[in-house]
Image: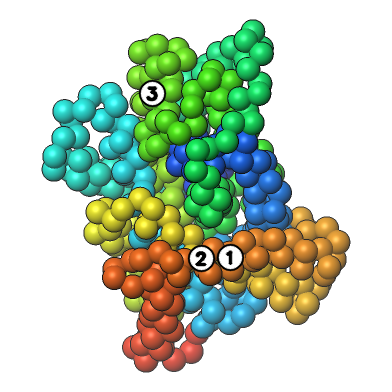
Amino acid sequence: MPRRRGPVRKLLLMPLIAATYFMVSGGPFGLEDLIGKAGYTLALLLLLVVPLVWSLPTSLMIGELASAIPSEGGFYAWVRRALGPFWGFQESWLSLSASVFDMAIYPRIFVDSLSHIRPALTAGHRSIFWMLAVVLVCAIWNLRGAYSVGFGSVWFFALLLAPFALMSVLGVWQGIHTHSFGLLLQRAPATDFTGALLFALWNYMGWDNASTVAQEVEDPQRNYPRAMLSAAVLVAVTYILPLAAVALYRIPADRFTSGAWADAAQVIGGRALALAVAFGGVLTGIGMFNALSMSYTRLPFAMAEDGLLPRIFTRRFANGAPWVSIIFCAAAWALALQFTFERLITMDLVLYGLSLILEFVALLVLRLREPHMARPFRVPGGIAGVIAVGAGPTALILWAVYISRAERFAGISAFLFACLVAAGGAALYALARLSLPASLPPPNPET
């Protein structure tokens, strides 16, 4: 098996926080439809409550498992250790299938933001070339290794949020001087609670993605719990403050659709601020695609090391980048760039949600089966605490799966399509066991 030929520069805490931020959020972009569907009151309520029942429990689960089993492949390694190779394969299959829909969203954000800077650049078929360029640039960037991706995420984080920080200050200042705090209670003309909650969940999902690069993180047992909780706070704050700012500046909620942040910035701070916010959207598209590429491409590598994929996926550069996996995944993501935004979110949420349930099951099984495993960080409350942290996210996922019956995808319901995708994982596992080594290596140790 090809191995690294020397020491690899590892992700420190700050780059890990920044990369995690982009794996989950990438700033307020993506909130536009939430505001338009819910109005300011419900949108703020969802952005305050969803982290408590979705983000915080998930972060606690990841903090425990990532510190106990800091293996390359992250959540795949956890599920495989707890439930065996079949379910480990399904975990990766569901996550990689979700990534096909998830990764098509961020080049679209890039193009929408670029069109606010210069519409002629994205007119007609030019948009697809820009989206393909995002895929290519991020693939090349990922070939430079995890350290390069994490370092870039820190700069993207600062440049992206600077104009939103200014917009937030101007909006709150306006609210103080005009006593317009009552606008925070403004309702949408036609509230779509179901759609709003789906968008809120999507804007807060992806916490486990950072776990897949565990062997490329400095002191993962200590840094993962800190990174998860720090990123959770940052995501919530950078959602809530800009949303409150546009409400206090008396911008109607029904004006918010995809790409509306630049228009809001124009009203609040003029053309220069609008251009800065639009440029932030360009950074969001690249930053999220780049960070998530780092995450997802470690899954085929880890599966190949375990004998569940051809061994060519174990090829790595000296900097640790799994170059075969990066090229393969980038090609797959490029094929899904033409799906519509809402359909992408529905499919992404359903498939990702099913994989997340497996992770909570793994957390419980490992507590019961391996109670003496070294866990530098633990979900508090013993077994009851483990069950409690999994209850909220699981209930929300099952609800999202239930309502996906009404969404159509490829001519059938999104729920049925997701079932077919999941069934495909079982079929592929059977094929892998026929064509690959009969004996699989034992699960990775916890250290």
Under mark 1, the amino acid is Trp
Is the residue under label 3 in contact with that under label 1 (CB below 8 Å)? no
For the residue marked with disc 3, what is the amino acid?
Asp
- Mark on residue 263? 3
Evaluate whether residue 298 shows in this view: no
Q: Residue 156, located in which quarter of the rendered image?
A: top left
| Percent coordinates x, y for residue 12 in the rendering | 58, 40
277 w.r.t. 372: above or below: above
- Image marks 2 and 1: residues in contact by CB distance under 8 Å: yes
Which residue reaches farthest front?
A: 189
Distance in Å between CA atoms under marks 1 and 3: 34 Å
Q: CA distance from mark 2 to mark 1?
A: 6 Å
Residue for point 58% across, 20% down: 248
Q: Quadrant of the C terminus?
A: bottom right
Q: Nearer the viewer, mark 2 or mark 3?
A: 2
Residue 277, percent from left and from top? 41, 24
Q: Secondary structure at mark 2?
A: helix
Q: Amino acid at mark 2?
A: Ile
Q: Residue at x 53, y 45 (%)?
A: 191
Image point (62%, 61%), residue name:
396
Q: Secondary structure at mark 1?
A: helix
Which residue carries the number 1 mark?
399
Residue 324: numbered disc: none
